[in-house]
Image: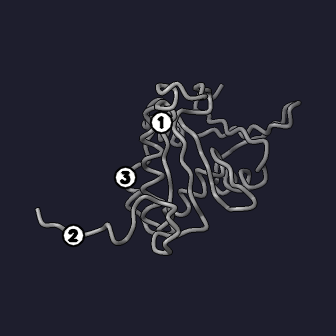
Amino acid sequence: KNKYVLHVDQKVKKREVEKVVAALGMNYHTHTDRNNVSRFTISSKELYGFFAEQGLASEKRVPRYLLNGSAKTLQALLDGYFLGDGHREADTGHRYAASVSKGLLDDMQEAAFKLGIPSNLLDYRHLAQRKMNYKPSHHGQYHLSLHQGGSMEDGSNLTSLRKKDIRSEEY
């Protein structure tokens, strides 16, 4: 039995996920369970090794070479991540994702910043510490939101960083 397998479970965006999986050019098969969740199983020692190198779930990061990529690469990274682990609001276009890895969401926020997409990263552990009505769950303790309708320069105040706040300093 092949021990180098990855599973991608999807209930909502099955066709989009299957297109991505098929484009990898690797052997895969699908199975839909009684809850209408499709599981895409990919057999690949190389792909398994790539993700295994990234560490445990809470340690995951985006490789630096991807974050230093072109705008097309950064957009594909965000689109792929949110396709698998996020959701988009139909009326606003805003995208949301949750993770136990702050580093992973930091990296996604960096990609969004480089593309000029305003974003917010929230640490929900602070809400629990302040005794607000938040209970940690399996959905992650860090939440990233991308505000697709705004841009860094339109004055929409969707981000705490404004163009007038950026300056060069010698050090």
Please provide percent x and percent y for residue 105. Answer: 48, 45
Q: Horizontally, is 169 left or right of 118 in the view?
A: left
Farthest right residue in view? 34
Q: Of circles 2 and 3, which is in front? A: 2
Q: Horizontally, is 166 left or right of 67 in the view?
A: left
* Label 2: few (<14), some (14–19) or many (≥20) C-alpha neighbours in 10 Å: few
User: What amino acid type should be assigned to the residue bearing mark 1?
Assistant: Ser
- Mark closer to the chain start, 1 or 3: 3
* Label 3: few (<14), some (14–19) or many (≥20) C-alpha neighbours in 10 Å: few
Q: Any mark on residue 101, and which?
A: 1
User: What amino acid type should be assigned to the residue bearing mark 3?
Assistant: Arg
- Mark closer to the chain start, 2 or 3: 3
- Which residue is drawn at the image coordinates 59% and 45% (left, top)? 97
**Which image quarter: residue 163?**
bottom left
Please provide percent x and percent y for residue 34. Answer: 88, 30
- Which residue is drawn at the image coordinates 68% and 49% (left, top)? 87
Which residue is identified by label 2?
A: 168
- Mark closer to the chain start, 2 or 1: 1
Viewer-closest of 12 and 41? 12
Q: Of circles 1 and 3, which is in front? A: 1
Q: Of circles 2 and 1, which is in front? A: 2
Spatial distance from mark 1 to mark 3, Cα to Cα?
16 Å
